[in-house]
Image (cartoon, coloured by chain):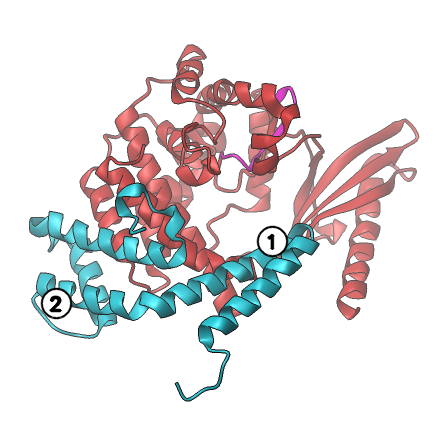
Chain colours: A cyan, B red
Amino acid sequence: MSQDKPDIKEILVTVKELLEGIAKQSKGSERYEALCGAFLLSVVDRELDFGARQDESQSGELQQLLGREGSLSDLYQQFCQQVRGGELDEQWPAAFDFAFKQVVDKVSVTNPKYLAEMHRSD
Amino acid sequence: MAAVSEQQALLDDIVAKLELALQRRYGQAARVENVSIATLGASNRTLLFDLVEPTGRRRLVLRQETLKSEVSPFISPHDQFEILKVVYRHGVLVPEPIFELEPEDDLDVGYVMACVEGETLPKTLLNAPEFAVARKRFAAQTGEIFAKLHAIDPGEVGYLEKVADSVDPLAAQISRYDAYCEYHPGLDVGIRWLENNRPKDKPRVFVHGDYRNGNVILSPDGIEAVLDWECAHIGSAMEDFGWVCLRAWRFGNIDQPVGGFGPRDEFYQAYTSNGGQAIDEEEIRWWEIFGSLRWAVLNMMQADGHISGVRRSLPFACCGRNTSMIEYDMLMTIKGHFS
């Protein structure tokens, strides 16, 4: 918290409001791009909010599933290669469930409204 | 300002050469008028124009390509034009193919086709009141179009056999995905499921490969033309069914699987009653799951274009994050929660 106000959240909201304002006043591709920009700032906001928590949780699950340690990116690589090679076929429900959870985590950051009722936390 | 005058110079150059190309084929009196730009990119251009002759005026479209990427998933403009000729001859609704560009035209590669009036924007087609009748007809008309297309002897488009998607569509998607060296647990699980549940081989037919809401021109009366044959290949008829019903192409109208317009039963009925082969709903489901993989990888491609600088674009940046929603569709469909 070494920085002055406005804090990161407030900055994101401010720039997002600017882009939404631009979108309201524009048409066609200019409007679309402004909306895309506002969307990306919302994504950043959510990722800052719970991205680290998701990483930690997934890391723990993968270490258990794969029986080994490593950075999250190593673990993803291991998981994907093993799934592809059929090495996790015997543990298919657990493998599928992990992938599903990882995808729900990503959608929670990208666009939580896209999640079906069963995956909403609100 | 510099960018605008560069664009204008480019346009002027193309129009001048186009006029010469038309005069070479239609006589000295031929003129180009009323040019409008659909796309004027670095590698890909589409211009609408009037061909004016003493006998009359006709609105045409110039499609031009300057780059041919090695890993492009799309077929060459030459093959696209050949395909247009074949499907047009068989009565499939497409713009009439007019002529192919030649080296002496000095316009790189491409072709000219007839301009078909109508609308392609999914949002407009799904919401504007004037398209109410067209919306109702879409599912059945698509069934008819597919029946006609899939009845064409694949031997007439034999050059498509060598396309990666003709050889093994799943392997083709996997190699595109692997090219990005990114690890998406959802996609690998989806790939494994697709491999473990491959449908039985069926008679191979000529498939459009990218028929969806967005690639079809509609008038208020209904479908006028099918566009964008760059993904055409030889394969299973059910592949075309899976793609048009992909959730992404329903644009929010989730309960109307056929492009967001209509129901499956009207679609399937129209296909079989117009001579199409038997519908295999399990296989269509496989192709919808496959379609999610394919669409996710295409979004990765867009994002990569942005990040690498080849094609910087804010919407392309969003594509990278949008893959998560496509993966969600894929896994929810595998689980049976989505259909």
Chain where mark 1 sits = A
Secondary element under disc 2, as helix, strand or loop, is: helix
Q: Write the residue at 42% across / 54% down.
A: B322
Q: How many numbered discs?
A: 2
Residue B143 at x, y percent in the picture: 46, 20
Crowding near the residue tagged with mark 1, few <14, some 14–19, many ≥20 C-alpha atoms within 10 Å = some
Q: Identity of the amino acid at label 1? A: Tyr
* Above or below B245: residue B105: below
User: Mark 1 or mark 2, which is nearer the start of the sequence?
Assistant: 1
Q: On the image, numbered disc 1 is attached to which residue?
A: A32
> What residue is at 46 percent from the left and 78 percent from the top?
A7
Q: Residue at x 89, y 33 (%)?
A: B53
- Magenta stretch: includes residue B219: yes
* Amino acid at dot 2: Gln
Chain bearing mark 2? A
| Picture layout, residue B166 above or below residue B66 | above
Taking the view exactly as shown, the residue that stands out farthest to the front is A5
Q: Is residue B256 left or right of residue B2?
A: left
Residue at mark 2: A63
Quadrant of image for the N terminus of chain B? bottom right
Q: How would you rate the neighbour count of disc 2 (Cα within 10 Å): few for under 14, some for 14-19, many for 20 or more?
A: some
Residue mark closest to the camera, 2 vs 1: 1
Q: Nearer the viewer, residue A9 or B101?
A: A9
- What residue lies at 39% left-to-right and 18% top-to-bottom? B268
Could you tell me residue A89's position as x and y percent?
11, 49
In the image, the segment drawn in magenta is: B212-223
